[in-house]
Each structure stands twice: as structure tokens, then as C-alpha cells.
Image: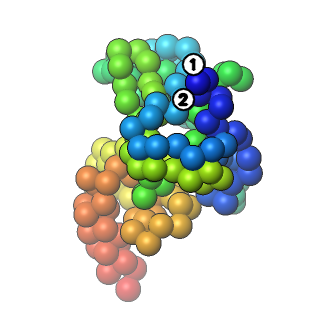
Amino acid sequence: MSTQEYIEIKGSGIHRHGVFARRGIPKGIIITEYVGRIISKDESAKIQEEMISKYKDDADNNAATYIFNISDDEDLDGDVPENDARFINHSCEPNCEYVIEGKRVFIRSIKDIKKGEEITYNYGFELEEDDLYEFKDHPCRCGSKDCVGYILAEDEWVRMRELLKSEHKKQK
């Protein structure tokens, strides 16, 4: 079965567009491949800076880069027309995960997904420093009950909650 038989692009309540299940998808299935061109970390940083700068005053935070970290030296730029996976949104309660095999990235279901359900995975962003400013550009809108408010790897949630609590105390 072609992976395109599993997914379709539609408007999303999380962020602009999303990827949805065309049919029921069982746990453990490779749903699609995240495709694009291999780029250097320098080129990746330039693309990300340009996008954040372009949308810095956009109240809806429409900045979107489709960069996937695949190694210490290279990234995958998924901003290509044939990459439907670039529209998969982040969630703090995902139904999928990404799997990196060499220079390829696959999206695999981690639970059964119902027809019509939005396909999501945790983008796995990490806090580089104890600096909330870094994450102000990455708000999470997944709506899950455990959402930390920012697109962030689950193993960083406790640290982020501590930072948010500390920031709240400073503002009082």
C-alpha cells in the first residue's frame, strides 16, 4: 500500500494545515516518509533565521520551517512540494513518532489511529539554555490536557514547567 493511501492534507485546528488519516491505521505502521533535500547545519540555521525574521510580527505565528535534524552535520529540508509529511503537526499527546534511518526520516504510528484523526508527533525540540525567550517563537496549540504550552520534547517538560513557574514568580 502506498503511504499516500493512509493520509490526506486538510485544515487543522492545531496550526493551519494538518495530515489526517484517510482510513484506520494500526499501531506500528510506517505512515509516510519525511522527504526533502540534505543541507548543512549552516544552511539550516540561515533558513530558520530568515523564517523567524519574516514572521516575527505575525500574531498568528505562521512561521514554519520544515527542517529535520538528522545528524550532527546535516539536516533534511522538507520544504519541497512532494513532502506531505511537512504538514504533520506537533502534539504533546502524539499518535506517531519519527524514526531516523541514516539520512531518511519515517513517520510511524505508536497507537491505533482512527479514520479522520489528525496525525501528530512530538517534534522533540530541546531547551538549549534555561531561557524562555528561545521558546516564545514555538508555542504549542495541540490542546492536550498535559500540554506544556511550547513545542518541546517530553523529557524537557519538567524543566520547562520549573522555568515557567520561576518566570511567573519574577513577574509578581
Colour approach in the figure: rainbow
Q: Residue at x 41, y 49 (%)?
A: 111
Q: Amino acid at mark 2?
A: Thr
**Eye-nearest disc, 1 or 2:** 2
Position of residue 58 relative to residue 33, above or below, is: below
Position of residue 122 relative to residue 4, above or below, is: below
- The C terminus lies in quadrant: bottom left
Residue 104: image quadrant is top left
Left or right, residue 55 beside residue 140: right
Q: Amino acid at mark 1?
A: Gly
Residue 159 location in percent, x, y?
25, 61
Position of residue 15 relative to residue 52, above or below, is: below
Mark sitting on residue 32: 2
- The N terminus lies in quadrant: top right
Left or right, residue 2 beside residue 33: right
How far apart, in angstroms, are the residues tagged by discs 1 and 2?
13 Å
The kind of secondary structure element at disc 2 is strand
Q: Residue at x 31, y 21 (%)?
A: 72
Q: Is residue 15 visible?
A: no
Residue extending farthest to the right is 11
Left or right, residue 59 beside residue 46: right
Query: Which residue is under mark 1?
Result: 36
Q: Residue at x 68, y 21 (%)?
A: 82
Residue 170 location in percent, x, y?
33, 77
